[in-house]
Amino acid sequence: MKVKAGDELAPLEIAVTRTLIVAGAIASRDYQDVHHDAELAREKGSPDIFMNILTTNGLVGRYVTDRLGPLAVLRKVAIRLGAPNYPGDTMVLSGTVNAVADDGTAEVKVVGANGLGRHVTGTVTVGLSRGAA
Amino acid sequence: MTVVREGRKAPEKRQMPGGRKAPEKRQMPGGREVPEEQQMPGGREASEEQQMPEGRQASEEPDELYERLKAFEGRAAATAGTGKDPVNEPMIRHWCEAMGDTNPAYAGPDAVAPPTMLQAWTMGGLSGHTDRSAAYEELFGLLDGAGCTSVVATDCEQEYLRPLRPGDLITFDAVIESVSERKTTKLGTGYFVTTRMDVRADGEPAGTHRFRILKYAPAAPKRAAERGGRSLRPRPVINRDNAGFWQGVAEHRLLIQRCGDCAALRFPWLPGCNACGCQEWDTVEASGEGAVFSQVVMHHPPFPAFGADGAGGPYAVALIELAEGVRMVSNVVGVPYDKVRIGMPVRLEFLRTDDELELPVFRGGEG
């Protein structure tokens, strides 16, 4: 897949369901109650359960490799969280290729926006061919 | 937001990447419907917000706690931690199912683990973790003791050095990389703590995981709550240089200073003339006529005392040019916030906001 600086990746809509939040938390071995128990989450001041950062990280990684094809390999993922992902919201991931380096890696700027604002912003560095180190 | 207050009873929540579980739990604030103290404006990026100027040093006083916290930089957060399970296909499959990730590289006989699972292999899971260092516990104990009992994760940066494959045994070490100075944020005042974990697979470097959290004391509940729900406007600071202005307000006169030498008018009140530096002055009473010179609409954060209906806004803040030529910042009343326009003629009136405060405001709209 030919990738060049300035390319925009097609957006990916993620329905932030209760099931996704819980499944992501458990798959990442994160048993914090705020990620599966709405009542306890409310006691701690959150209106509902919310997605954990590991799930966000996983979704950002999935988005970039989905869009850049099966040869793309994640090298670095750096994210910063903003507005939480609560059940019932939709997060739209979008990405722009910042740069493509001579070593066959590309740097992609990713934003995940939900109904409250930006849930995540980040930079993903990806190898574009599986062979490239 | 989601910030969660927690005390020591829930130790897992504040774990660090260095430990087996991470503090990822608390994400950032951001939502409108979240309790105010936990809220971040407009869902902006939290840490960005937190690091904004207001989040600069919390005070000018020397921060003795910071000196103690800083001493932890470079100390281990976790030493010789081990993953509870080797890298394995079922966990990879569960992860891919949850994420909806159908990348063929993560399935089949030559499967590798999704790189973003890096931290997952180090998590303590429901049975907790045992690898955190005494230094790490001590650092968090100091912060808890200082009232910084809440945690919010702000950043995660991972670099993947080699693919993880089923059967790889995971080990890790983590270090307390940095502790910030005391910062005041929308959430409260606290310290950013950054840890870096080095993850190995079968003894070989497999990746690094840097994690940043804010450990903070939640901001004090709004004064409104303490006053039984009533929210008051801030009190003016009255001093020798501006007492005459406030005396005028009390008499429903808007007074402008006039230089005793060059007769230049000035506002707000100052000890000396902007034009010639002369410190002699008298006053002239404004006619009360003026026009909107510039304006902005305040949307967020809401300050209930400023909304006509107690909702806290949006409300218009205007720079009024008085007929005498000086300008002052005030509110425009009698006009919806989104109908205030530059050039709109306005007329002075005095608004009693509560028992103790009266303010000059400007009525616009008519004619």
Image: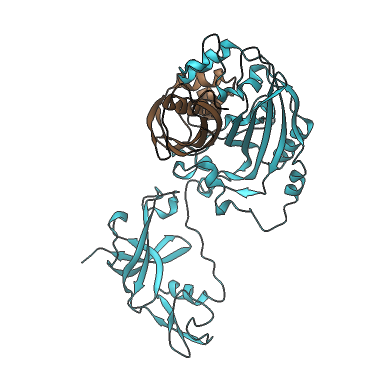
Q: Is residue A9 left or right of residue B109?
A: left
Q: Position of residue A81 (x, y in %)?
A: 52, 36
Residue A114 visible, this angle: yes
Q: Position of residue B310 (x, y in %)?
A: 40, 49
Residue B123 visible, this angle: no
Determine the residue positioned at 50% across, 83% down: B273
Q: Residue placed farthest to the bottom in the image? A: B261
Q: Is residue B36 left or right of residue B77?
A: left
Q: Is residue B199 above or below residue B64?
A: above
Q: Position of residue A25 (x, y in %)?
A: 54, 21
Q: Position of residue B56 (x, y in %)?
A: 60, 53
Q: Quadrant of residue A93?
A: top left
Colour of chain A, in one word, is brown
Q: Residue placed farthest to the left in the image? A: B367
Give the colour scheme shown.
Answer: by chain
Determine the residue positioned at 54% across, 80% down: B271
Q: Is residue B299 left or right of residue B94?
A: left
The quarter in which the N terminus of chain A is drawn is top left
Q: Quadrant of residue B240?
A: bottom right
Q: How many marks?
A: 0
Q: Is residue B139 left or right of residue A123?
A: right
- In front: B287, or A132? A132
The quarter in which the C terminus of chain A is drawn is top right
Chain letter for the part of the structure drawn in cyan = B
Determine the residue positioned at 41% across, 70% down: B328
Q: Is residue B256 above or below residue B139?
A: below
- In front: B358, or A50? A50
